[in-house]
Amino acid sequence: MPIFTKLRNIYWQIRYSRNKNRKRKYYRHAAVEKKRLIASGVDPEELRLLCRALSKQHCEHAERHLKAYQSKVTKDPISSSIFDDGNCL
């Protein structure tokens, strides 16, 4: 989804960076991006679960919690196509 591409890129940088200073830098970028998304109207709980799933790419529980929350939400979930058949895109 085009809304979360920047956030997905930031979390990719965090996961694959070995330098602690660089990781802190990307966590600051992620915090700014989260604030921007919340201000634009994204559901904060869905955003929190999405960030958890992005930070722990192989954690099945994080992905399961995100999908369960998206199915509970009565309105159209904003990030319904982030994960496809259990594999992260």
Image (spheres, rainbow, N blue to C red):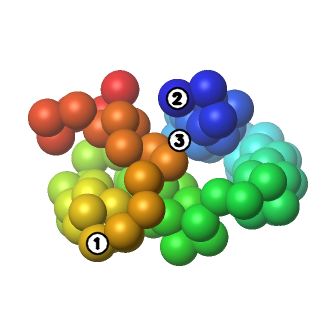
Picture quadrant of residue 65: bottom left
State the residue position of label 2: 1
Sequence-wise first label, 2 or 1: 2
Mark 2, secondary structure of its residue: loop
Q: Residue 72 got which mark?
A: 1
Q: Amino acid at mark 2?
A: Met
Which of pointers 3 and 2 indicates the residue nearer the eye? Answer: 2
Q: Amino acid at mark 3?
A: Arg
Mark 3, secondary structure of its residue: helix
Q: CA distance from mark 3 to mark 1?
A: 29 Å
Query: Quick check: 1 left or right of 61?
Result: right
State the residue position of label 3: 15
Q: CA distance from mark 3 to mark 2?
A: 20 Å
Vertical order, 69 against 16 (above or below) = below
* Residue 64 visible somewhere in the drawing: yes
Q: Residue at x 23, y 32 (%)?
A: 84
Q: Residue 9: image x %, image y %?
A: 63, 30
Sequence-wise first label, 3 or 2: 2
Query: Quick check: 54 left or right of 38?
Result: left
Q: Amino acid at mark 1?
A: Lys
Q: Residue 31 got which mark?
A: none
Q: Quadrant of the C terminus?
A: top left
User: 6 or 78, which is in the foreground?
Assistant: 78
User: 13 or 66, which is in the foreground?
Assistant: 66
Do labels 2 and 1 touch, CB within 8 Å?
no
Q: Residue 3: image x %, image y %?
A: 64, 35
**Other-residue count near label 3 (Cα within 10 Å), few / some / many at <14 / 14–19 / ≥20:** some
User: 41 or 13, which is in the foreground?
Assistant: 41
Q: CA distance from mark 2 to mark 1?
A: 20 Å
* Residue 62 visible somewhere in the drawing: no
Vertical order, 77 against 48 (above or below) = above
Mark 1, secondary structure of its residue: helix
